[in-house]
């Protein structure tokens, strides 16, 4: 009487081949998802800061501004105290995701600064584009004159 124990080498090779095919399909899909998630996270964080400091401008009855620096891939948040501007925070675009960067020059009324007024509006509307280096995907953060901020895929 013969007992079959375990798997034959042919069965193991077939299972390994199936796993390799599944992995070959899944890895690029996962990488694409991860790249898109990193880009969206960076864009949403930046848009949230614009919204937050617009709300703070109203609550504190003072002007705030966010100046974008494409070269350093960061932005500086400032508030107005008397006649001078005081730094509140400096944030890196896509912190933790070095592959996300500012794409093109930000355009807010002809400059790279978003000015928030105490009445809850912006001095001028405009947009900022972020790009993921590996995937090449681009998102656009738009801020309207009335203070609406949204993120959209390009």
Image: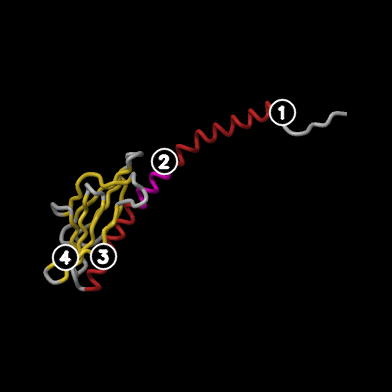
Q: Tag 1, which secondary structure?
A: loop
Q: Residue 40, image x and y in percent?
A: 36, 50
Q: Tag 3, which secondary structure?
A: helix
Residue found 20% across the figure and 56% down from its top: 67
Quadrant, the C terminus = top left
Tell me whether circle 2 and circle 1 mark residues in contact (CB < 8 Å): no
**Crowd tier of the residue under label 2, counting other residues whose Cα lies within 10 Å: few below 14, some 14–19, many 20 or above:** some
Q: How many numbered discs?
A: 4
Q: Which residue is mark 2?
A: 32
Residue found 27% across the figure and 52% down from its top: 141
Q: Residue 110, image x and y in percent?
A: 13, 52
Residue found farthest to the left: 83
Q: Which residue is mark 1?
A: 8
Q: Could you tell which of marks 4 and 3 lies nearer the N-terminus?
A: 3
Tell me whether circle 1 and circle 3 mark residues in contact (CB < 8 Å): no
Q: Tag 2, which secondary structure?
A: helix
Is residue 40 in the magenta section?
yes
Spatial CA distance of label 4 from label 1 is 75 Å
Q: Which residue is mark 4?
A: 85
Magenta residues (range): 33-41
Q: Could you tell which of marks 2 and 3 lies nearer the N-terminus?
A: 2
Colour scheme of the rendered structure: secondary structure
* Label number found at residue 53: 3
**Crowd tier of the residue under label 4, counting other residues whose Cα lies within 10 Å: few below 14, some 14–19, many 20 or above:** some
Spatial CA distance of label 2 from label 1 is 37 Å
Q: Could you tell which of marks 2 and 1 lies nearer the N-terminus?
A: 1
């Amino acid at each position: 009487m013969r007992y079959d124990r375990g798997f034959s080498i042919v069965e193991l090779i077939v299972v390994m081949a199936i796993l390799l095919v599944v992995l070959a399909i899944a890895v690029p899909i996962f990488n694409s998802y991860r790249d898109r998630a990193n880009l969206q996270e960076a864009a949403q964080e930046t848009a949230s800061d614009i919204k937050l400091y617009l709300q703070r401008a109203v609550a504190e009855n003072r002007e705030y501004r966010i100046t974008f620096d494409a070269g350093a891939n960061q932005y500086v948040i400032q508030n107005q105290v008397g006649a001078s501007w005081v730094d509140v925070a400096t944030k890196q675009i896509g912190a933790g995701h070095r592959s996300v960067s500012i794409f093109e020059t930000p355009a807010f009324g002809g400059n790279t600064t978003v000015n928030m007024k105490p009445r809850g509006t912006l001095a001028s509307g405009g947009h900022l584009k972020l790009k993921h280096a590996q995937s090449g995907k681009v998102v656009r953060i738009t801020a309207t004159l009335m203070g609406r901020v949204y993120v959209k895929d390009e």
